[in-house]
Amino acid sequence: MELVSSSRSILPSCNRLVAPSRTAAKRDGKRGLVCVLRGEPGGCSTEQKGAVEGRIRRRAALTLLLATPALSVPFSAHGKTKGMNPYDERRLLQQNKKIQEANRAPDDFPSFIREGFQVKVVTPENYITRESGLIYEDVKIGTGDCPQDGQQVIFHYVGYNESGRRIDSTYIQGSPAKIRLGNKSLVPGFEEGIRDMKPGGKRRLIIPPELGPPVGPSTFFSAKQFEVFDVELLSVEDCQRRTIGFYSDVVCS
C-alpha cells in the first residue's frame, strides 16, 4: 500500500516535466489572447500576457507601416531632389569638353550637365535667357529693320546637338535658307530668335526641347534635347502674292 501511494505521488510531478504538444501550445496562445483582450481574471499567466501583448504591439506597428504611404515618400523623393556634388559637376564639365573637342565644336560652345530629367546649361555671362526658355548671344548686331510676318528671311545657319556634333549647315550646302515668317515653317525657338535680328547680324541660339524641332526618323533629331544654332541673317525681303490666270504664287524681292 505504501508503494502504490508513493507511485501515485510521483506521477503528477513527472507529468509536469513533459513539454506540451504544438496543439496545446496553439490552444494556450489563443486562450492567452482571449484573456488579454477580455481581461478575464486569473485566466492567463504572466508569461502568456506578456507574450501576447508583445505580439499585438508588433503586429500593430507593422500594420501602421504598411498602411501609411506617406512614410515611404521622403525616402524615394530624397534621391531625386538631392543637389549635385560640385566635384561631380566639374567632372561632367570636363567630360563634355572632351566630347565637344572630339566633335570639333566651337571653342566657346555651351555645356549641358544632365542630372536625371534636369539639365543645367553652362554659358558665359553675356548670354541672355528669355521667359520662354530661349537662350541667345548676339555675336554681331546688324543694321536695318527686323523682319515681320509675311516677309522672307534669307540666312545661313549651323546646327549642333548638345555634344557639339554638327547636324546641319547651309554653308556646306552652298546656299542660304529662305523662309517666310508667320507660316510656322521654322522651329519655334528658331523663329523667336530670328525675329528681332537685323540684316547682317549674327546670333547663337540655344533652343530648349519645349521650343525645339519634332523628333523622329524623318528629322535630324533623335531625342528631346537642347539644340544650338549659329545664325547669320543676310537680308529681309518683302513678299507679294500675284495671280496669273488660274495660277497664284508669292514673289519676294
Image (cartoon, rainbow, N blue to C red):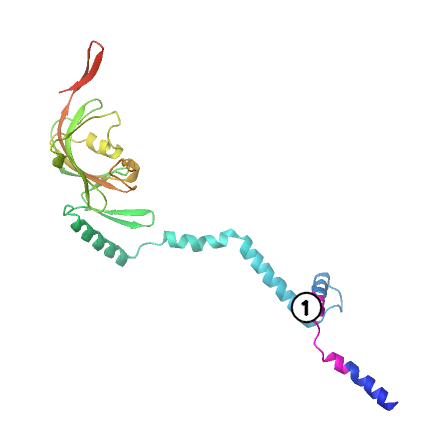
Return the x and y of residue 95 as percentages of the image width and height: 22, 54
Q: Mark 1 points at which residue?
A: 49
| Type of the residue with mark 1 | Lys
Left-right relation of 56 to 186: right
Q: For the view shown, which residue lies furthest in the front direction?
A: 217
Please state which of residues 167 and 40 is positioned toward the viewer in this rendering. 167
17 in magenta: yes
Residue positioned 23% across, 10% down in the render: 246
Could you tell me how many numbered marks the image carries? 1
Pick out the residue farthest to the right: 1
The percent coordinates of residue 175 (x first, y second) are 12, 31
Q: In which quarter of the image is residue 171?
A: top left
* In this rendering, position of residue 60 left or right of residue 191: right
Residue sitting at 49 percent across and 52 percent down? 70
* Rendered location of residue 235, percent (x, y): 12, 27
Regarding residue 38, the answer to whether it shows in the image is yes
Identify whether 217 is placed above or below 245.
below
Q: Quadrant of residue 181?
A: top left
**Is 110 displayed left or right of 51 in the figure?**
left
Q: Is the magenta stretch mostly helix, strand or loop?
A: helix
Taking the magenta stretch, the answer to whether it contains residue 79 is no
Residue 2 in picture, x, y percent from top left? 86, 90
Can residue 231 be seen here?
Answer: no
Q: In which quarter of the image is the C terminus?
A: top left
Viewport quadrant of the N terminus:
bottom right
Provide the secondary structure element on which disc 1 rests.
Answer: helix
Span shown in magenta: 13-29
Is residue 99 found left or right of 56 in the rendered image? left
| x 46%, y 52%: residue | 73
* Residues packed near mark 1 inside 10 Å, few (<14), some (14 to 19) or many (20 plus): some
